[in-house]
Image (tube, rainbow, N blue to C red):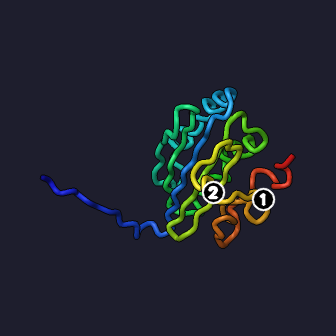
Amino acid sequence: MARVDRRTVNLSGYPDLIVVYLGLRVNAVVGIKKALGLGPQIAKSVADKPDGLLLPEVLLYSLFPPHLGMRQYWRDFESMERWTRSEPHRRWWKDFLKESGGTGFWHETYSIRGGIEAIYDDMQKPVGLMKFAPLVQARGSVFSARQRLAREGSESSPAPAPEDGLYR
């Protein structure tokens, strides 16, 4: 019998590593169109290799209902935040928060320095952390990922839309 080739990784070169799980779930038939429209745009944005993105991986959470996602490894929080506040991500975020188009979106962020943050937009069924942790409105002091992770410093650029303009 062969022994198991057991290994680990040396992450000392990534002292601020960030891992993000993301998902887009189709909540209604119209959401299929939204998901198909975003797919090529997301693929292109990843192919452009944004600064700080070490590795993107595509994930399939379920076929029915369609629930696709990614796992992304970022060099540091600042490069991830900078990318999320630039085009085209900025536009996607702003458009989605106006109208989810029959889909739900979520992400969970894990930091090697400690801390976890998450957001769930129009998710009709619980996923990840929301399956066991109490939910609160993502407003005010927990509106942005930087705030939810209790990161020092200021956000790299303003949010795509003022927070108070996002609510009906």
Q: Which residue is mark 1?
A: 139
Q: Please tell me which residue is depicted at 75% across the width and 55% down the height of the picture.
A: 159
Residue 29: percent from left, percent from top: 67, 26
- Residue extending farthest to the front is 132
Tally of numbered discs: 2
How far across and how far down the image is residue 93, in percent?
A: 70, 46
Element under disc 2:
strand
Q: Residue flagged by tag 1: what amino acid is it?
A: Arg
Q: Nearer the viewer, residue 81 or 109?
A: 109
Task: Give x and y (percent) for residue 27.
Answer: 67, 34
Q: Amino acid at mark 2?
A: Ala
93 or 23, which is in the foreground? Answer: 23
Image height of 37 relative to 150, above or below: above
Residue 153: quarter of image: bottom right
What crowding class fits label 1: few (fewer than 14 Cα within 10 Å), some (14-19), or many (20 or more)?
A: few
Q: Quadrant of residue 125?
A: top right
Q: Does residue 163 sit above or below 66 in this rendering?
A: below
